[in-house]
Image (cartoon, rainbow, N blue to C red):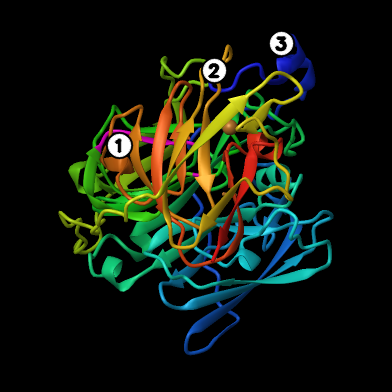
Amino acid sequence: TDHAAHLGHSGTVETVANEVTAAPPVTPFSVPLPVPPTLAPTSTTADTDFYEITSRTAAEEILPGFSTEIHGYGGSYIGPTIKAKVGRRVVVRHTNQLPHPTAVHLHGAHVPASSDGFPTDVIDTGATKTYEYPNNQPAATLWYHDHAHHHETENIYRGLHGFYLLEDPAEAALNLPSGEFDIPVLLSDANIDADGQLVFISLDEYGRTTLLTNGRPAPYFQVQARRYRFRFLNASNMRVFNLVLGRQERFTQIAGDGGLLPAPATVDKVLLSAGERAEIVIDFSRYAPGTQLVLNNTRNLNDPSRPVALPVLRFDVVARVGQDTSAVPATLRAHPPLPAATRVRDVVLSYHTAAFPFAINGMLFDPNRVDYTIRRGSTEIWRITNPVTPVAVYHNLHLHLVQFRILDRNGVPPGPAESGWKDTVFVAPGETVRIQATFTEYLGKYLYHCHVQDHAGTGMMALFETVA
Ligand code: C2O
Ligand code: CU
């Protein structure tokens, strides 16, 4: 299983702990896919865009006919999308009107430590903090989410997540589908009770049975018979998504976490562990108007080797309006080799018995302990292992500050879908994944952690410090 029977829970204990009367099931494809709105800057100067976001409680109709209390950026389950440009600074003034602390992390971004949303660098209720983002990295689909110590997993679950789309002229020149044909899609899951309320229970993977796509249960989306770009983000706490279109249709993956791949990859699935992104292009001109194509999550929580079909989104193809002038060029972005590594480190995603469930190298998170001191500008290889344990548990590893490249997984180089920049890497039970990163530019303490939020929140997180 993906993460069965944690903490010594037997099936019975799990049932008791999760005794919540669930909301009635929703007929799939009964609501349209909402697209999160783009946030307008409050002001701009020659080199900077300024934004303001207030985190607050609000009511949202997540399931049809129910009003659900959410904790959201701007009062939405999915926060407003920030569109940033490489080379232009973004400054976001975050105000916290929630009854608990928050800390905002821009996942995947190179940012100074003071703006990275360190878990103890929180915004208390009623307070405001300003975050500065230099945007000095290639175009990518980034996302912002909560990181407040001991609150992050529940804060994200209740809605503290949103897209941050970084754009650059090189990518724009490729003429990929854009504007209304470029759609961010946030995937999450929830345990919703009979009153329509979000139920948060730690390590509740079997209780979070409602899959949400941009905050709605299995919505439909009307598409013209032309190319679309979709930016998928797995923002769920622990679920793995394996996205399959129709009866295993083929489509094109163009980007991973850190932006464009070297070249487009023809794929028939997208596998996303928690925190990862993948961008794909689907050419709906191959389907007659009237065609309905369902995107399913085929990952079976109980046994990943036995696929299931859980609906995520249905595409309803309609006639094209006007010409489709977009393209997917044969090369997307050069990825020159990284400088040679001067250091190799071993990172063991360890799973111990009850007292110490999820740790890194046998240690629980301590915001005052630095495990790795790294000279600025140096390049390192990290060898990340998820040992086989009696109960197989999947993990991944996310590094703050840097984007890395995957060298190999159990000795085998990654496939095309993982050949670009990454900031989060899936590590299945029994796997060792080697990554290489250059720790450039900013000095300070940064996190690395499993992005299964319930694992990170219960200790599977550690610090490195970059020094001059
Ligand atoms: Cu997406 Cu440290 O997080
Ligand atoms: Cu984990």
Left or right of 310? Residue 152 is right
| Foreground label between 3 and 2 | 2
**The furthest residue to the bottom:** 46
Circle 2 — which element? loop
Circle 3 — which element? loop
Q: Earlier in the sequence, mark 1 or mark 3?
A: 3
Circle 1 — which element? loop
Q: Is residue 176 above or below residue 240?
A: below
Where is residue 337? Give x, y as percent: 26, 53
Label 3 packing within 10 angstroms: few (<14), some (14-19), many (20+):
few
* Residue 300 visible: yes
Left or right of 321? Residue 156 is right
* Residue sitting nearer the eye, 170 or 455: 455
Where is residue 23? Give x, y as percent: 69, 30
* Mark 3 residue type: Ser
Q: Which of marks 1 and 2 is nearer the N terminus?
A: 2
Q: Which of marks 3 and 2 is nearer the N terminus?
A: 3
Q: Do the residues labelled 1 and 3 touch (CB within 8 Å)?
A: no
Residue corresponding to mark 2: 392
Left or right of 200? Residue 435 is left
Residue corresponding to mark 1: 414
* Mark 1 residue type: Pro
Residue corresponding to mark 3: 10
As drawn, the label of residue 333 is: none
Q: Is residue 30 above or below residue 437?
A: above
Measure how far apart labels 1 and 2 are at the Cα level: 22 Å
| Foreground label between 1 and 3 | 1
